[in-house]
Amino acid sequence: MIFAVAEAEVTEAASHHVFGAWSDLVAGEQPHGLAESCLLRGDGVWQIISVWDNVDSLDRALGDEGAHPANAVFDAAGIDCRHSTMHVAGHLIPTDRRNHR
């Protein structure tokens, strides 16, 4: 698994564009290999966290214009984002939650 984080500073005025693009992403076709993704909002900083099946899937999404969820969402608001990528070295799903996924 690959864990990718895209982060950008988003003004309150631009936040509705981010929400709108996120809604379009959720309702539309997602890129192949995307396992899950979350939109996070902090104090002026927003992140899109995504989990990918493998590095090839992430590379394809980053290489295809607008295919990566973060690019589609932040681009819609006219915002450049920073990307970081990590290989998942360990993963825990608590025993009492394993049947709920």
Image: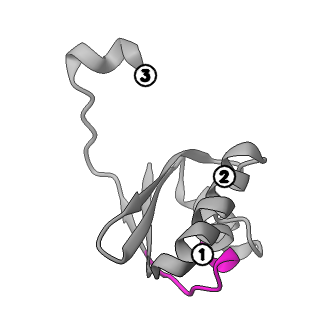
Name the secondary structure under disc 3.
Answer: loop
Say if 89 sits above or below 6 in the image.
above
Q: Could you tell which of marks 1 and 2 lies nearer the N-terminus?
A: 2
Name the secondary structure under disc 1.
Answer: helix
Instruction: List x then y, in percent, for residue 15.
Output: 53, 71
The quadrant of the image that shows the C terminus is top left
Part of the protein shown in magenta: 74-83
Query: In percent of the image, x 77 and y 47: which residue is there?
Result: 28
Mark in front: 3 vs 2: 2
Question: Could you tell whether 26 is left or right of 47 in the image?
Answer: right
Mark in front: 1 vs 3: 1
Query: In percent of the image, x 64 and y 70: which residue is there?
Result: 17
Check contact, mark 3 vs mark 2: CB within 8 A. no
* Residue 79 in magenta stretch: yes
Question: Label 3, label 2: how many angstroms apart (C-alpha)?
Answer: 22 Å
Q: Could you tell which of marks 3 and 2 lies nearer the N-terminus?
A: 2
Question: Could you tell whether 60 is left or right of 91 in the image?
Answer: right
Q: Which numbered circle lies on residue 23?
A: 2
The residue at which mark 1 appears reads as: 74
Please state which amino acid type lies under the numbered disc 3: Arg
Name the secondary structure under disc 2.
Answer: helix
Instruction: List x then y, in percent, for residue 57.
Output: 63, 57
Please state which amino acid type lies under the numbered disc 1: Phe
10 Å crowding of disc 1: few (<14), some (14-19), many (20+):
many
Question: Could you tell whether 98 is left or right of 31 in the image?
Answer: left
Q: Which numbered circle lies on residue 101?
A: 3
